[in-house]
Image: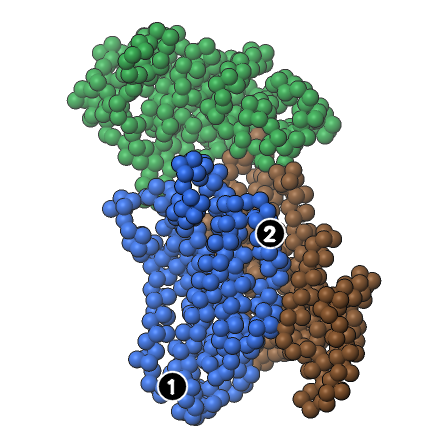
Chain colours: A blue, B brown, C green
Amino acid sequence: MADGTDGFAVKLWRSRSGRAGIILCSLIVLAAFCAPLITLYNPLEMGVGTRLSGPSGQHPMGTDEYGRDIMTRILYGARISIVAGVGAVLIASFVGVNTGMVAGYFGGALDSVLMRIMDAIISFPATLMAIVVIAIIGTNSLSSILAIAIVNIPTFARLTRANVLSEISKGYVEANRALGFSHTRIMYQEILPNVLSTLFVQITVSIANAIMLESALSFLGLGNPPPAPSWGSMLSTGKDYMLYAPTYAIFPGLSLTVLIVGLYLLGDGLRDVFDSRQSGGR
Amino acid sequence: MIPAVLVISFVVFMIINLIPGDPATNLAGANASEAQLQALTVKFGLDKPLLHRYFIWLGNFLKGDLGNAIISDQPVLEMIGSRLGATVELTIVATIFSIVISLPLGVVSAMKPNGVIDRVSTMFSAIFFAVPGFWLGILLILLVSVVLGLLPASGRVAFSSDPIGHIRSIVLPMLTISLGMAARTIRYTRASLMDVLSQDYITTAKARGVPKEKVAYRHALRNALIPVVTIVGLQMGDLFGGAIVVEQIFAWPGIGRLVIQAISWRDYNLLQGTVLYIVLVFMVVNLLVDIINAMVDPRIRLK
Amino acid sequence: MGNSAAILRVCNLTVQFQMAKDTVHAVNGIDFELNNGETLGIVGESGSGKSVTIKSIMRLLPTIPAGAIFYNDEDLLKLSEDRMRDIRGKEISMIFQNPMTAFNPVLPIGKQIAESIEFHEDVTAQERRFRVFELLSEVGISNPEYRALQYPHEFSGGMLQRAMIASSLICSPKIVLADEPTTGLDVTIQAQIIRLIKQIKETRQMSLIWITHDLSLLAGLADRIAVMYGGRIVEQANVDALYERPLHPYTQGILASIPTLSTDRSSLLFSIPGLPPNPMALPQGCAFCERCKEAMPICGDRVPALKESKNNHLVACWKYESECGGNE
C-alpha cells in the first residue's frame, strides 16, 4: 500500500526510527509543557523536602541542595532546553537559509562577502564562539539562544548555498528567468521547495546539537542564570555534590540523552522518508 | 595564508574588545578612586583608540610578543605555553585511543554487516553519539572515582614527577573525549568502507587475480579511510583548542580552562592571545587536512 | 557429448541469490560451450542472467553457484580460492562494462593494469612497466609512458575502455569475458572498440565471450550466439543461422525490432509487448510464455528443454518439439 502518494506524516510513522523519534520527542515535549499537571511542586520552591535526599516516594528523583524537588526542576528544565534548542535553530535557519539562498543565487561579490563572513564564524570552534558571544552580550535567558543561533548560521548558509547552486545547474532557474519571473519568486517559490528536504533533516540534527550546546553553556554558568532549572546548571551543581547525593547529577544528564536520542531518531526517520521519495518509493 | 591570519587577528581583537568591562576596572575593584582607575587604564594602554591599540598589538604579535597577561603580568605566550602541554597531550592520547578502538570495529562492521560485531558497535556508537560529553565525564567520575575509588576525580599529575600518577589522572578525561570521538569514527568508517566495497573497482581488482588481503588493503581500506582522515583531523583541530568543557570538569590545566579564566578576569591581553592561538591552530589543522586529502586523492589535486 | 575443441564447458549452471524475503533465480540450469578460438556472443535483456553467468565463470559472486564449469578438465566451481586466483587474470580475464567506475580513482592506471602481472608472474618492476607500455600501445593509447602515470579521471570513456582491455590482456589469457564493453560508450567509440577487440583476438588467438543486449552488434563479431531469457538459454546457433532463420519467438522478436535501412519509416518501430520476467517470481512454464504470440497451453505448464533442431542450432521451445524429437 506504499503507493508513493502517502502523506509525509504517514511515511515518517512507517519508518522505524521515525516512529521512535516521534514518540520520544512528543513524550518529552508533552512532559515539559504539561509539567504543572504532572508534578505538584514548584520548581523554585525551596525546602519541600530534606536537602540532597535521594529518590524516594515523595521525590522520585530526589531533592537538590536547596531542598527543591529535582523531578519538577527536570520537567520545567525541559522547557528551557527545548525552547533554547528550537529557538536558536529557528533563528539560525531563518538567517542562514536566506543568506545561503541570496549568496548562491546572485553569486559574485555578494556571495564572496557573505561566505567570508560565514567562514569567519566557522573558524572559531563552536563552544568558544558561543562563550565569547555570551561574554559580550551578557548572561541572561536570551543570550544563549542568540549565541547558539550565531554558531549555527553558517551550517544552514552553506547547506542552502550548495543546494541552490545545484538547483541552478539543473536549468529551470534560467528558464524561469526567461519567462520573466522575479528573483524573489524564483528563489522562494521555485528553488526553496526543492531544498526543503535536506533542510529538515539538518534542522533536527542542529536542534539536537543546539540543546547540547545550551546545556554545555549553562554547565559553565553561562546560560539561564539561577535559580532557573536548566539541565546544564543542574549537572554542574550535581557534580559538586556528587559525594553527598550521587543521583543528583544522573537525572539531568539522562533527560538530555533521551531528548537527543529522540531527535537523532527523528532525523534518521526524516532521512528515510526523503530517501524513499528520491528513489521513487518502495 | 597571511591575509587570512591578518583578518582573523583583526576579528579576534575586535570581538574581544567588545566584551563589556575592562581589565583596569576589574583589577581596580569596586572601591578604587578615580585616580587609581585612571592610572591603571593608562598603564594597560586602554586610553588609546581601539584601532590604534589593534595595530600596536598586531605589531608586537608579528615580533613574537603577545604582551603580558594583566592578571599575572606573565607574558601571554608563556602562559599559553605552560598550558599547551596539557591540552596537546590530552588531544593526542584521546585521538589515538579512539582510533585504536574505532577503526578495527568500523572495518569489521563493514565487512560483516549485521554480524555480531556490527550490531554491538552500532549500538555502542548510537549510545555514545547521543550522550553529552560532559555528562559522560561526570558519570565516569561518579562510577570510577567515587563509587569504585580507582582513579582521581580531577587534576593533572605531570608525567615527569610521577608517571603512574600521570597516567591515572589522564584516563578519565581521555575516555570522556575518546568515547564520543570513537562513536563518530566507527560510523564514518563503517559507512565509508561499505560504500567502497560496493564499488566496481573492487570486483575488477579481484578479477585481475589480486588476493583478497591486497584488495582489502590497497583498494578498499585506502579509499575508505580518506573521508575518515578528514573527520578525525577536524575533530583534532577542535580539540587542540582545548576541550573547554572537559577541562573544566576534570580541572585539567589546559588552554580551554585558561580561556574561561581569562574571560572571568576580563584579561584582554590573555584573552586575545589565547583566542588567537585557538583560531590559528584550528585554521592550520584544517589546512593540513586539506593538504593530506589532496595528497591522497588525486581527483582533488587539480583544484 | 562435447566438442573436443571446447575450452570452456558450462554444465547445468544455476545461480540463486537470497535476498531478505525472496530468492532471486538469476540463472536456471544453463549449458553451453566455448570452443577454442571462437567468439561466443550471449544476448539478453537486463535481468536475463547473462552478466551473472560470466561472473560465475570467474567466481566473482558472493556464493558459489550450483552446477559445473569445466576449464580444461578442471571444474572451476570446485577449485580452491587460491587456485581460482591463479586463473583469474592470467588464464581467464574480464572486460567490465563501465570503465569509469571499474578503475580505482586514486591509483594510477599503469599500476592497476600491472596488477595482474604483479600477482601472477615473478618479474621485476621495470619489466612490468615495460609490458604495460607495450600493451597500452597495442590498444591504441599513444604516449603510453606518460599516460600510464595518469589517473582514471584524466582519461576519456573510450580511452578508459582501451585501458580496461589492456588490463585484461596483459597476462595473455586464453579466454576473455567481455561484459557489455561498449554499452556505456558513444556510438563512434563503440565501433572503434569493437574493431580493436576483433583485431586483438585475431592476433592473440584467444577465445572470447561477448555479452550484450544488442544483437545487431554481434553480427560481424561473433561466431556463435546464445540467446538468454529469464535465466535460461532459449536459442543457440551459428551467427549466420541465427540471423537467417531465428527459431525462438523471442529471438524473432529481437531481430524484428532492430530498425534497418529498409524499415518503413512511416510505421511504428516494432517492439515485443510486455515486460521481462521478475527473477524473484519466475513463471512455472516457459518464461517467455506471457509475451509470446504463439503460446500454447503447454508453454504455461512446463519449461521447454534446449534441444537441437538442426545442424548445431539449438532451441528451447515447444513449437519445435516434434522437429527436435528424441533426446539430446
In the picture provided, is A43 more to the left or to the right than C257? right
Q: Residue at x 44, y 53 (%)?
A: A199
State which chain disc 2 sits on. A
Q: Secondary structure at mark 2?
A: helix
Amino acid type indicated by mark 2: Val
Packing grade of label 1 (10 A; few <14, some 14-19, many >=20) is some
The residue singled out by tag 1 in the image is: A42
Q: Residue at x 54, y 31 (%)?
A: C100
Residue C328 x %, y %:
31, 15
Q: Residue at x 54, y 35 (%)?
A: B201
Residue B165 x %, y %:
70, 75
Task: Please determine whether, in this image, residue B298 is positioned above or below residue A148.
Answer: above
Task: Please determine whether, in this image, residue C60 is positioned above or below residue C191.
Answer: below
The residue singled out by tag 2 in the image is: A113
Q: Residue at x 80, y 63 (%)?
A: B59
Q: How far apart are the two marked residues, 2 and 1, measured between alpha carbons?
A: 50 Å
Q: Secondary structure at mark 1?
A: loop
Can you tell which quarter of the image residue B255 is in?
bottom right
Residue B99 can be seen in this image: no
State which chain disc 1 sits on. A
Query: In this view, which residue lies farthest toward the left?
Result: C297
Task: Please determine whether, in this image, residue B101 is positioned above or below residue B164.
Answer: above
Residue A197 x %, y %:
40, 50
Amino acid type indicated by mark 1: Asn
